[in-house]
Amino acid sequence: MSKARNQPASVAFGSPIDTDGPRVALYSEEYAADPHRAYREMRSQYGSLVPIDLSPGVPATLVIGYHTAVRILNDPDHFPADPRTWQRDIPGECPVLPMLEWRPNALRSAGNEHLRYRQANAVSLAEVDLHALHAVVEHAAIPLINAFCGDGAADLISQYAFPLTFQVLNDLLGCPPEIGQQVATGMAAIFEGVNADKGNAMLTDALFELVTLKRSVPGDDITSRLIAHPTVLSDEEMIHQLVTIYGAGIEPQQNLITNTLLLMMTDDRFAGNVHGGSLSTRDALDEVLFTDPPMANYCVSYPRQPILIDGVWLPAHQPVIISMAGCNNDPAIGVSEFGPNRSHLAWSVGPHSCPARSVAYLIVQDAIDQLLDALPEMRLATEPEQLSWRPGPFHRALVSLPVTFPKSPPLVIL
């Protein structure tokens, strides 16, 4: 790979501009197996800004310094989220393109357009009835638990976390199951980076069908509220608002449920909670969000011009990825400096911070509590080090989470 022309010379640890140097392959199985070791090695070699490849031939800069990340996340003028200049040279079949490409939504826009999309989403999400949401989660959880509680064993990803988050999100969006299944298949392809372009097309077609349905038959759901918002979103804009909500609502919530359950079953401070210990599900959730968040690396921006940060030149229009996991575990900070673990960056900060935090917390916490209340003697079915993690530059996701427990009769659905 040749050097970028007409760019400033590198300084300090070696600049991500200098593309002739080695780059960390964030898509590798080695990284997925032990990302925390990878972050330590990156920090030792590069400091807070690391030259990476998101996929073969797709360079980016990974931010693993907490203070540096906060500065970038709060500076949308120098670090806008609009990728259109960058993606001109990216082939359509690039496996990470659907996760990064421009869409007319708040996540991939800047300035007034960002504000417009952000307001529509924030208002629509704020009208979710959190008290009624408890019943929605319970309604999804109990039949799933009843399907395997008599077996004495289960995979908590395929049999619980994924179908639960999928069903709850479809309920919130007013999405019929047949459309939702197409959405789930397309979204999975995008996150995995396997046939991502086809998955993107499937997702778009399914969401257009949902928008068409809700324009003709509105309901008390997020999709209908987005359609009715005074911003008057077009069909294309509606599709991409829903892409954002599904992207944030399925994979990250699934991973947060399973990563938190893994912690609670393997860490003595939390394992006791299954039998009524002192530390709560919320404590475990916050620890996972701090140490091992379900979206490990994201919050992408694209500098408008070369910019010097921490003695490193970042190139114009190349992705700058915030490593929430790397930043939260930055030795330069500590709980003593920032107080409780809720100082983490898992929800991002600044103008692109997650507007659905309260909804996500409730869904994940209720999903975990429903399961632990039903199966309090649940145990991991294998040694923790034998679990496999799915490769990918963005998520922190297990392949499966096998558990065992005493066979139990079905729960009564009231």
Image (cartoon, rainbow, N blue to C red):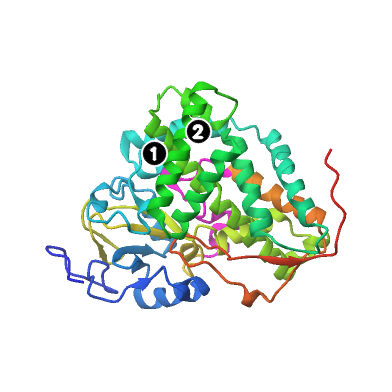
Residue 327 shown in magenta: no
Q: Residue at x 52, y 66 (%)?
A: 390
Drawn side of residue 155 relative to residue 253, left or right: right
Q: Is residue 15 above or below residue 140?
A: below
In the picture, the disc for residue 105 is 1
Q: Pick the residue in front: 263 or 191.
A: 191
Q: Is residue 179 above or below residue 282?
A: above
Report x, y in % for residue 248.
51, 47
The amino acid sitting under disc 2 is Leu
Magenta stretch, residue numbers = 334-357
Drawn side of residue 192 relative to residue 181, left or right: left
What residue would you read off at disc 2?
A: 210
Residue 345 shown in magenta: yes
In the picture, the disc for residue 209 is none
Quadrant into which the N terminus falls: bottom left
Q: Is residue 340 visible?
A: no
Quadrant into which the C terminus falls: top right
| SS at circle 2 | helix
Instruction: Classify residue 358 by image quadrant.
Output: top right
Q: Residue at x 21, y 57 (%)?
A: 306
Q: Is residue 272 visible?
A: yes
Report x, y in % for residue 165.
62, 47
Q: Residue at x 45, y 72 (%)?
A: 39
Pick out the residue farthest to the right.
Answer: 409
